[in-house]
Amino acid sequence: MINWQELVIFVKMNFITPNRNLAI
């Protein structure tokens, strides 16, 4: 199962960081 916490952090990082290359 995927951890919802990790998913939330990933989405937040993607949303906050304008550079999509940084967030893989």
Image (cartoon, rainbow, N blue to C red):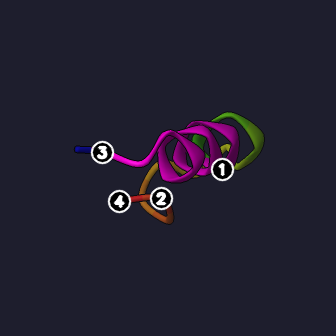
Decide if residue 22 is on the left or right side of residue 15: left
Q: Name the residue under label 3.
A: 2
Is disc 1 surrounded by few (<14), some (14 to 19) or many (20+) residues within 10 Å? some
Residue at disc 2, secondary structure: loop
Q: Where is residue 3 in the image (x, y as percent from the top left)?
A: 42, 48
> Please, what secondary structure does the residue beneath circle 1 have?
helix
Which residue is painted at 77% across and 42% down in the image? 16
Query: Which residue position is annotated with label 2?
Result: 23
Residue at the location (57% across, 37% down)? Answer: 11
The alpha-carbon separation of the residues under discs 3 and 4 comes to: 16 Å
**Disc assigned to residue 24:** 4
Q: Is residue 23 left or right of residue 24?
A: right
Camera-side mark, 1 or 3: 3
Residue 21 located left or right of residue 12: left
Magenta stretch: includes residue 22: no
Q: Do the residues labelled 4 and 1 touch (CB within 8 Å)?
A: no
Q: The C terminus appears in which quarter of the rendering?
A: bottom left
Q: Which amino acid does the dot numbered 2 rest on?
A: Ala
* Range of magenta residues: 2-13
Q: Do the residues labelled 1 and 2 touch (CB within 8 Å)?
A: yes
